[in-house]
Image: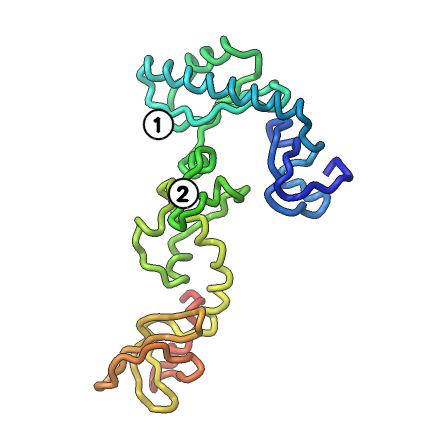
Amino acid sequence: MLTEQAHAVGSVVVVQGKRGPEVATIRAEAEPEGSGRYGMILRAASPDDLSAWAKLEAEGEDLKWLLRVRARDRKLPVKIVAMEFTLDGALLTVSYSAEERLELGALIQDVREQTRARVNFVAIGPREQAQIIGALGACGRENCSSHHLQDFAPVSIRMARDQQLPLNPEKLSGPCGRLLCCLQFEHTQYTELLREMPRKNARVCHTESGACGKVVKLHPLTNTVDVLGEAGAGYMQGVPVSALGPAPGGASASKPAGKKD
């Protein structure tokens, strides 16, 4: 930080962003000094800062709709998502999305005729669109990308498998159509828990009853599994891992579920 003053969560401040000075709201406690991940706090936002920022936002919104009309008139398959000024008005960033590479020279000229700011066109993907526009997630709350996430970490279908979630694309996808960002939040904990559990489809035996079967479902949070018994043993639900051992001749059954072959 460049200021000595501590700013509470929810405070409106002026920060030195990647593009230049911007008005921002503090979402979380400050990181250790010198980390410099998301920009430095220059000062608390003054009434003049807020007034100037509001005027720039209004100007950007007007330019966005103007550019959308110009793109439609030229039949360009492009979506103008946002137009954002820096607080000093020196830079205007135009965020857009397109399915294919386009020649945008005419649109760039259209914008330059309307502002003295330097204009920068930036192509963005579905996640960035959701971050800018905002949406409700499956949980009923504002989507994480527009609420608190600062960066997009890689998300894979492996994370859903490790958390024993049904591999239903509709339930695993966010408003952007990509895998839910929140799949990454608890993945490390699930990976740790799975290390102490048998693999799915491993053959195990219940140490007390001697009944053997195949592991068909894992419950990492309770450290239990469901076992489909053999020889009429039936379906054993919620069996503690501590009460299981490898089946005769099935040494591989005890290999932790969280490790790869």
Q: Is residue 259 above or below residue 179?
A: below
Closer-to-camera residue (44/100) = 44
Residue type of the residue flagged with mark 2: Leu
- Give the mark nearer the N terminus: 2 vs 1: 1
Element carrying mark 1 = loop
The image shows residue 246 at horizontal and vertical percentages of: 38, 83
Q: In the figure, is residue 165 to the left or right of 112? A: left
The image shows residue 187 at horizontal and vertical percentages of: 47, 59
Badge nearest the viewer, 2 or 1: 2
Element carrying mark 2 = loop
For disc 2, the neighbor class at 10 Å (few under 14, some 14 to 19, many from 20) is some
State the CA–CA distance, disc 2 to disc 1.
28 Å
Question: Seen from this angle, which residue lies furthest top?
Answer: 113
Q: Quadrant of the C terminus?
A: bottom left
The image shows residue 97 at horizontal and vertical percentages of: 40, 28
Q: Quadrant of residue 197?
A: bottom left
Q: Is residue 110 above or below residue 179?
A: above
Residue that label 2 marks: 136
Which numbered marker is on residue 100? 1
Chosen colour scheme: rainbow
Residue type of the residue flagged with mark 1: Glu
What residue is rendered at 35% in x and 51% in y?
172
Question: Seen from this angle, which residue lies furthest right?
Answer: 4
